[in-house]
Image (cartoon, rainbow, N blue to C red):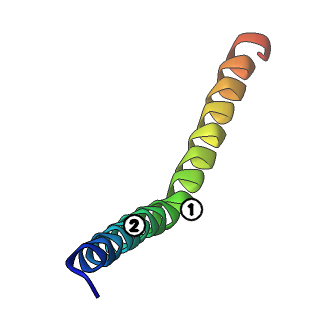
Amino acid sequence: MTDLSAEKMHAEIVKMLDEAYKARAEGDKIKKEERWYPFVVSVSLIGAGAALFAAATAFAKIFLP
């Protein structure tokens, strides 16, 4: 092997390692987001239910004796 081909191979290896690192970081980010998704949906549904209850209560106070 010549020095030039060894340098090319080294550069290729460094590039692959960098891409692998980026892919792993992206995977970790997605795992973190997946963990919070059920919590966010639950809180949103509870908030929507509370808003509907408040609206129904206000409607009942206005239109029902």
Q: Residue furthest bottom?
A: 1
Q: Position of residue 29 (x, y in %)?
A: 41, 62
Which residue lies most toward the left here?
Answer: 3
Q: Decide which of 26, 52 is in the foreground and name it.
A: 26
Left or right of 22 on screen, residue 7: left
**Left or right of residue 64: residue 11:** left
In the depicted view, which residue is nearer to us: 40 or 33? 33
Q: Counting other residues with Cα less than 10 Å from the Cα at mark 1, is it few (<14), some (14-19), or many (20 or more)?
A: few
Amino acid type, residue under disc 2 in the picture: Glu
Image quadrant holding the N terminus, namely bottom left
Most extreme residue toward the top, as rendered? 62
Going from N to C along the chain, the mark reached first, 1 or 2, is 2
Q: CA distance from mark 1 to mark 2?
A: 30 Å
In the rendered structure, find residue 38 and report the number of the disc placed on it.
Answer: 1
Task: Tell me the quarter of the image containing the C terminus.
Answer: top right
In the depicted structure, whether residue 52 falls above or below residue 45: above
User: Which image quarter: residue 26?
Assistant: bottom left
Asked which secondary structure carries label 1, the reply is helix
Q: Would you say the residues marked 1 and 2 are in contact, meaning their CB atoms lie under 8 Å apart? A: no
Q: Position of residue 17 (x, y in %)?
A: 33, 75
Which residue shows up at 31% across the image and 77% down it? 5
Q: Residue at x 66, y 35 (%)?
A: 53
Q: Residue at x 59, y 48 (%)?
A: 46
Mark 2 nearby-residue class (10 Å; few <14, some 14–19, many ≥20): few
Can you identify the residue that label 2 sits on? 19
Against 2, residue 29 (above or below) is above
SS state under label 2? helix
Name the disc covering residue 64, or none: none
Q: Residue at x 57, y 45 (%)?
A: 44
Q: Please, what is the three-letter code of the amino acid marked with disc 1?
A: Pro
The spot of residue 40 in percent (x, y) is: 52, 52
Report which quarter residue 58 is drawn in: top right
